[in-house]
Image (tube, grey):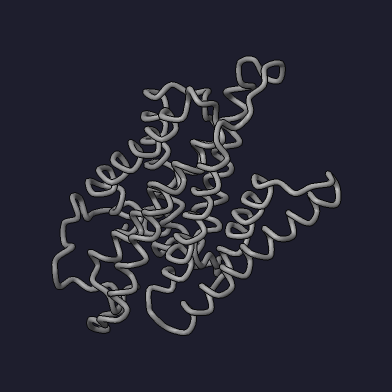
Amino acid sequence: ASAQDGLDSGDTAWMLTSSLLVLFMTIPGLSLFYAGLVRSKNVLSVMMQCFALTCMVTVLWTVYVYGLAFGDGGSMNSFIGFGKLFLSGVEVDTMSGTIPESVFQMFQLTFAIITPALMVGAFAERMRFSAMVVFMALWLTVVYAPVAHWVWGGGFLGAMGVLDFAGGTVVHINAGIAALVLCVILGKRKGYPGNPMAPNSLVLTVIGASMLWVGWFGFNAGSELAADGTAGMAMAVTHISAAMAGFTWMLIEWASRGKPSVLGIATGAVGGLVAITPASG
């Protein structure tokens, strides 16, 4: 995304749309998905966490994180980027390939927003809001930004040939490992497994999962950074993977438990979306 190819209005229109779709995955998609899975007293808590992360990550990204991830680090470029503080140099006519850099940074910002938000489900009901804010700010700075630079920003992993079309490494493995570490550190939920902790509203969870499914087209097909055949194929395989995984989960659950569940098919579909992401292009 560095060639000065001139503006392509079709590519730009698609990337503007993709940015909206990925943001749609976090607020409201992920918020509703998690809100339905927690106890009723914690619904607003997890929704507040996703909403607040959207605001905080946007501020930090604008101030310095975009520079760390996609700036030119000079002699240190294999490991980290620099510059672009407060999006300096990102002008109306600054290009990133065939799209304006303003659109490119906005698209990448939506990835930076949803990645820490993915972890919310791991520590739901177990972490103070203030601790979450501090942890996520530090994690975005010292983990997400460097890894994004290593893979997508001209760092050493990309130079070694590591392929991550839409975030399997930068987003899913990155957030998954962090979530696992948080779970180990925080330990079991208070009262678990003695007290029942059933989801308060699977209706919200299914609505959220449906929004994730739709938004994922921007996540994967948008990562081509162009409106072309590869983007079309990425969209096709993304939809097929989600449908196949959801249907397979339903059949396995049906055979093993005697009936399928709405939580199972929704979880399966999201699993399919995650699995196809890094190679969807």
Report the front residue among 96 and 13: 13
Report the front residue among 81 and 132: 132
Instruction: Locate residue 121 relative to residue 227 in the image: left or right.
Output: right
Q: Residue at x 60, y 64 (%)?
A: 276
Q: Residue at x 38, y 73 (%)?
A: 225
Instruction: Locate residue 187 relative to residue 32 in the image: left or right.
Output: right
Q: Residue at x 55, y 48 (%)?
A: 206
Quarter of the rendering occupied by the N terminus: bottom left
From this view, report whether residue 87 is shown above or below residue 227: above
Report the front residue among 255 and 215: 255
Where residue 184 appears, x then y in whole percent?
63, 28
Report the front residue among 141 and 52: 52
Q: Residue at x 65, y 47 (%)?
A: 262
> Which residue reaches farthest left?
92
From this view, report whether residue 225 is shown above or below residue 248: below
From this view, report whether residue 167 is shown above or below residue 45: below
Q: Is residue 14 visible?
A: yes
From this view, report whether residue 33 is shown above or below residue 189: below
Where residue 222 appears, x then y in whole percent?
41, 69
Quarter-wise, where is residue 96 in the image?
Answer: bottom left
Where residue 271 appears, x then y in whole percent?
63, 54
